[in-house]
Amino acid sequence: MSSDKLKDVKAAGESAAETARDEIEAVKAHLERLITKHVVPALTNAGGKASDLTEEAVANARELANHARKDISKQTRVQSSWVSIAISGVVGFVLGRMSR
């Protein structure tokens, strides 16, 4: 091979490498624009929606807990009322028998 051919091959290789670098840089810039314009806003919106859903879920959980607490409180009051009446009846019966 002559030195002219080697120089031509070397120049063609350098040109191809430079073209590839330029294309890679263009793709990088395009990707950065795409991420900035579309992905970041979408993720921001998703984060806001997730925050809203989390707050709503916490509010629903609190409401359910309060409702359950009220139900349990009502059941306990009803049961304790009957227990109090039964105890009073038994104590009254025992005291009545002892007083004879």
Image: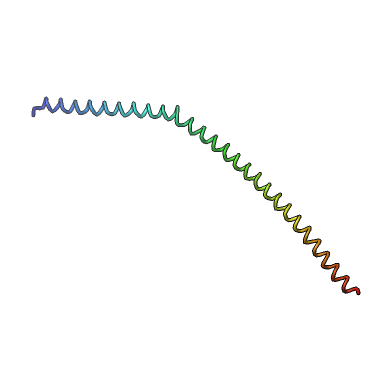
Q: How is the image coloured?
A: rainbow
Q: Residue 64 versus residue 12: which sits nearer the camera?
A: 64
Residue found 48% across the figure and 31% down from its top = 42
Q: Quadrant of residue 98?
A: bottom right
Q: Is 64 placed above or below 3 here?
A: below
Residue found 49% across the figure and 30% down from its top = 41
Q: Is residue 56 left or right of residue 20?
A: right
Q: Is residue 70 left or right of residue 41?
A: right
Q: Residue 2 versus residue 22: which sits nearer the camera?
A: 22
Residue found 88% across the figure and 70% down from its top = 96
Q: Dividing the image into 4 quarters, which one contains the C terminus?
A: bottom right
Rendered location of residue 47, percent (x, y)? 52, 36
Rendered location of residue 77, percent (x, y)? 76, 55
Q: Residue 19 versus residue 77: which sits nearer the camera?
A: 77
Q: Dividing the image into 4 quarters, which one contains the N terminus?
A: top left
- For the view shown, which residue lies furthest in the right direction? 100
Rendered location of residue 44, percent (x, y)? 51, 33
Number of numbered markers: 0
Residue found 65% across the figure and 46% down from its top = 64
Q: Is residue 93 left or right of residue 76?
A: right
Rendered location of residue 93, percent (x, y)? 85, 69
- For the view shown, which residue lies furthest in the left direction? 1
Q: Is 79 placed above or below 36 here?
A: below
